[in-house]
């Protein structure tokens, strides 16, 4: 991280410019080198696909009002958000199907 001082070109600049990222915090402008991202591994891609399927299933489950009443009661009892409960259940179902 580099701190930029008294440079009229970069004063107040923010965002990505080439391979550098400029941020302004508390009136000070800082310059960061943009890290090159690595491609996702096969395991990461598989996990992303699994998560996307669970999101789709959860969105479909939200349309079933009776099921959602049961999920809401459970979520309230466990102090969780209903969508998190749906995601947890659907991820568990998908993992069991793959095994």
Image (cartoon, rainbow, N blue to C red):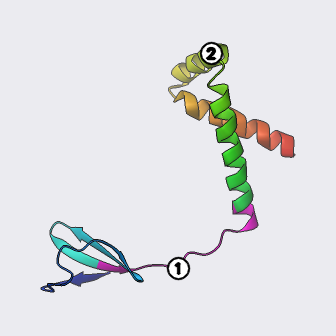
Query: Where, by quadrant of the figure, is residue 57 drawn?
Result: top right
Mark positioned earlier in the residue sequence (2 or 1): 1
Residue visible at 56% across and 23% down? 75
Q: Nearer the viewer, residue 17 or 69?
A: 17
**Do the CB atoms of the residues marked 2 and 1 lie less than 8 Å apart?**
no
Q: Secondary structure at mark 1?
A: loop
Q: How many marks?
A: 2
Image side of residue 31 versus residue 82, left or right: left
Task: Answer whether residue 13 is magenta in the image.
Answer: no
Q: CA distance from mark 2 to mark 1?
A: 45 Å
Residue 22: x percent and y percent?
Answer: 30, 75
Query: Where, by quadrant of the figure, is residue 27 drawn?
Result: bottom left
Image side of residue 56 versus residue 13, left or right: right
Position of residue 77 relative to residue 35, above or below, is: above
Foreground label between 2 and 1: 2
* CA neighbours of label 2 inside 10 A, class few (<14), some (14 to 19), many (20+): few
The residue tagged 2 is: 65
Position of residue 28 relative to residue 43, above or below, is: below
Residue 72 got which mark? none
What residue span does the magenta drawing correspond to? 31-44
Residue 36: x percent and y percent?
Answer: 52, 79
Residue visible at 67% across and 47% down? 51
Residue 36 got which mark? 1
């Amino acid at each position: 991280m580099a701190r930029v001082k008294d440079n009229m070109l970069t004063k107040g600049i923010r965002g990505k410019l080439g391979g550098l990222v400029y941020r302004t915090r508390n009136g000070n402008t800082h310059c960061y080198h943009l890290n090159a991202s690595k491609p996702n591994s096969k395991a990461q891609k598989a996990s992303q696909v699994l998560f996307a399927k669970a999101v789709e299933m959860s969105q479909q489950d939200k349309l079933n009002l009776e099921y959602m009443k049961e999920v809401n009661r459970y979520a309230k009892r466990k102090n969780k958000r209903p969508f998190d409960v749906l995601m947890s259940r659907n991820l568990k179902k998908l993992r069991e199907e793959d095994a």
